[in-house]
Image (cartoon, rainbow, N blue to C red):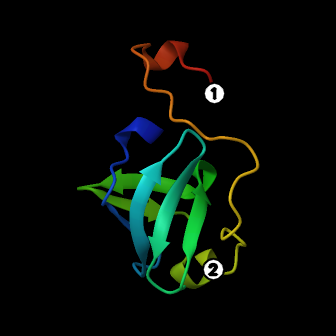
């Protein structure tokens, strides 16, 4: 899965099928999510994303656990999505 595969407006779902929210922005290391269960936004790290199917993004944690991860804090560094033409073999990981 590449971060460039994620789309704004896609649903974000826990591995238990519970809806976490909707993707507002995609960065290189995080996605900004309008949360369905919290009053604010969540900055979900790329490492928590398991897979993407039919514009639904699945986490590797349950919905309930996603709300307990402390993802309400924004990343310390700017997180600009790299959208260059390089192939997967030459991407910086």
Locate residue 89, reporting x and y percent: 50, 15
In the image, 45 versus 58, the foreground residue is 45
Residue 74 image point, x, y percent:
68, 59
Q: Image height check: is 34 above or below 2?
A: below
Q: Tell me which corner region of the image, top left, top right, bottom left or bottom right, holds residue 78.
A: top right
| Residue 1 visible in the displayed image | no
Per the image, the residue denoted by label 1 is: 93
Does 9 sit above or below residue 72? Answer: above
Q: Which residue is mark 2?
A: 65
Q: How many marks?
A: 2
Q: Position of residue 56 (x, y in %)?
A: 31, 61
Estimate the x, y position of residue 64 in percent, counting from the top left. 58, 85
Q: Is residue 6 left or right of residue 66?
A: left
Residue located at (39% from left, 78% from top) = 17
Eyeballing the image, is 41 above or below 81? Answer: below
Q: Secondary structure at mark 2?
A: helix
Asked where in the image residue 58 lies, by quadrant, the reply is bottom left
At a point 66% along the width and 71% down the height, the residue shown is: 72
Residue under the point 42% across and 73% down: 21
């Amino acid at each position: 899965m590449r971060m460039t595969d994620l789309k704004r407006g896609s649903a974000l779902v826990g591995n238990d099928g519970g809806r976490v929210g909707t993707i507002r922005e995609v960065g290189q290391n995080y996605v900004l999510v309008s949360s369905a269960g919290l009053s604010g936004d969540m900055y979900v790290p790329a490492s928590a994303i398991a897979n993407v199917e039919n514009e639904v993004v699945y986490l590797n944690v349950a919905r309930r656990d996603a709300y307990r991860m402390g993802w309400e804090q924004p990343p310390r560094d700017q997180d600009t999505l790299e959208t260059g033409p390089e192939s997967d073999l030459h991407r910086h990981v």
